Image (spheres, helix red, strand yellow):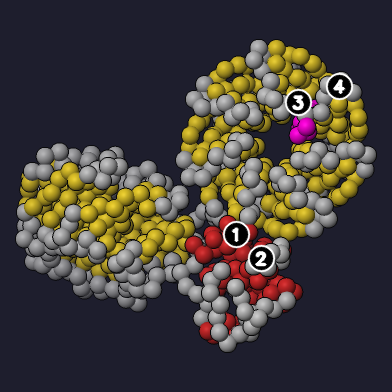
Amino acid sequence: MLSSEFTQTEDQFSDTLLDYGVDGLADDVERSILLGSQAVYATVQFGQAAVPAAEDTLHRAILSSPLRLNLHHSFGVNSVAFSRDSQRLATACWDNSAKTWDIATGKELRTFRGHASGVTSVAFSPDGRRLATASSDGMAKVWGPQSGKELLTLRGHAGEVSGVAFSPDGQLLATASLDETAKVWDVATGRELRTLRGHSGWVNGIAFSPDGRYLATANNDETAKVWDATTWRELRTLRGHKSSVESVAFSPDSKLLATASLDKTARVWDAATGQELRTLSGHQEKVLSVAFSADGKRLATAGLDVPKLWDAANGQHLRDLKGHSDSIVSVAFSADGRYVATGSRDRTAKVWSTSDIQELLTLGRSDSDGFGKLVFSPDGKRLAATANDNSVRVWDSITGRELLILRGHTDSVASIAFSPDQQRLATSSWDNTAKLWDGVTGRELLTLHGHSAHVNSVAFSLDGRRLVTGSDDETVRVWDVSAGQELRTLHGSGPVRSMALSVNGKWIGSASETTVTMWDAPSGKVLFTFHCANVVNSIAFSPDNGRLAAGCWDSTARVWDTATGRELLTLHGHSGVVSEAAFSPDGKRLATASFDKAVKVWDATTGQELLTLRGHSGFVNSVVFSPDGKRLASASSDGTVQIYAIDIHDLLALARSRVTRSLTPDECKRYLQSATCPAIP
């Protein structure tokens, strides 16, 4: 709890954040997160709602932070390696162990113990079914990553084993050692196949080329060597560094070789000729590790100062990854290119975003065609989105793992809905049909024919026995889910762009051009007609059925009273088309998605703007709250789905995970006007 020394008024804290937090994002993201956390906590610790300005700033600071995971160890971390599917990270530690971690959650999966001394290097096999470790005990080991079982112990080196690398086909394992040799082993049997001699000093690192033609070694004699990976003949020695070469890495196309050295540089070489192409100068201290991104466009380097990202084509410095408090001895890119991992003697491994903005989770790929509508499953464990390739993607909403891809429509999928029992999914499409799918297997169950134009919207009844669809053919249709039989047709006044069912199942809402019509579901009678100044894109009922919200083409969202038809709110703030509006499960908040690339959250009673979430680089097409109201998801034309932390306590916990330090005494004095610093909330 903050003492009275820190309890400025809400307005004072808001002013502090606006003056220092947002303005300081470019200078020090961690400071902005720390200040935002203090401002939020100053009110929520007393059971009050967070000051909107402080909460908004904390979201903005978290979105600006490249740090994704901060993985703590009991001793220094010597090596990091991603699995090929980018879902796991392996770390090697001085406490004689290796660990694997879940990238989505940061959860420790398994600890591998068996070495008698510090573990110096770690590597996944290409198929992810093996994990290799090297140790200063002079041995290498091969493990089952899932079982944790030790499969092989490789003995033969006369000194510390400093590096391990699998061949691209996973059949060979190469080891580097301080005994001035490298060795090649059969992974199936553990048999030593070859010893590579010719180094005049320690062999510090080792790597196979992705095409399997070459093996490279990093040497203490200021050189790197390239070997033929078939004959094991030495092909060339790369000279140019002025001190020990600590690490080697091939580009994905095997044409380039990067080296890291204690001379404070990294260098890029032509792997076929040995010609030096460029020198990366910018580190002020020794460089210990180097890695290429999976697309070959970026390089990462790490050492005794700050890890750096570089443009691999021209050597331009792109970004620093600030956060470690001691030497960084290992760096690795994930295979999907979204993350960089660093291992440090400060007893942490950190996972950083390379480019994607992310709060809780980012789903999809930034190079895909984009996503349209979103829906959570009733239990909140799954999230489904319509994709621009005529498919639907279903993910685990906690881990981000893709569970299903639904294919079958021949044109764009416009809408999607889970049945109340979660056993089925319904989709509507511009191919003039709606479809029912098995929610577990993804198998197509039924195709509903009857509409004569684009089917833009679909929804299940409360009991799951009926399906309602809205179409450009100016009708809303009600279907029997079990038989696929059309039960009723409601004729509107224009193409139905959006349709919604009230939570109590009594009303159907439909949006046609600038008009919203509310129907009595049992009788089909029109109850009210609402009007927007421009085209209505989407509609949604509040959980208590008392309000109807619409996202409109005129950059506004509007809220009406369903009992009287009176307009309650017009929400101004977006600078682009409002594509969707969604109520929170408790009805207290309204979220809007817009073509201005932002998501906004509003007080659904007063219309006060509470948050602006800028996690996308393209139009935001859809927004939805999780059933428990703790998360908010948005889908965009930029090819990603973003998940945000809306629960304030979850937001504070997320903020803690994105910082590596506390406020300094000078910062507390300057920004909090306090001589002493509070703990991180």
Main SS category, magenta section: strand
Q: Which of marks 1 and 2 is nearer the N terminus?
A: 2
Residues under numbered marks 1 and 4 in contact, where contact means CB atoms less than 8 Å apart: no
Residue that appears at 64% across and 83% down: 5
Is there any visible trace of residue 330 in the rendered image? yes
Residue mark closest to the camera, 4 vs 3: 4
Residue that appears at 49% across and 62% down: 657
| Number of residues whose C-alpha sits closer than 10 Å to that of mark 1, classed few (under 14), some (14–19) or many (20 or more) | some
Q: Give the range drawn in magenta.
A: 495-504
Vertical position of residue 385 compared to residue 663: above or below: above
Look at mark 4 in the image and give the residue it sits on: 524
Residue mark closest to the camera, 1 vs 4: 1
Look at label 2 and name its amino acid: Val
Look at label 3 and name its amino acid: Gly
* Residue 500 is covered by the magenta coloring: yes
Q: Provide the secondary structure element on which disc 3 rests.
A: strand
Q: Using the image as rendered, state which of residue 355 and residue 631 is in the foreground.
A: 631
Q: Which of marks 1 and 3 is nearer the N terminus?
A: 3
Look at mark 2 in the image and give the residue it sits on: 44
Residue that appears at 56% across and 30% down: 391
Look at label 1 and name its amino acid: His
Q: Where is residue 558 in the image (x, y as percent from the top left)?
A: 83, 46
Q: Where is residue 277 in the image (x, y as percent from the top left)?
A: 30, 61
Residues under numbered marks 3 and 2 in contact, where contact means CB atoms less than 8 Å apart: no
Look at mark 3 in the image and give the residue it sits on: 470
Look at mark 1 in the image and give the residue it sits on: 649
Residues under numbered marks 1 and 3 in contact, where contact means CB atoms less than 8 Å apart: no
Q: Provide the secondary structure element on which disc 2 rests.
A: helix
- Residue sticking out furthest to the bottom: 675
Structural distance between the alpha carbons of marks 2 and 4: 47 Å
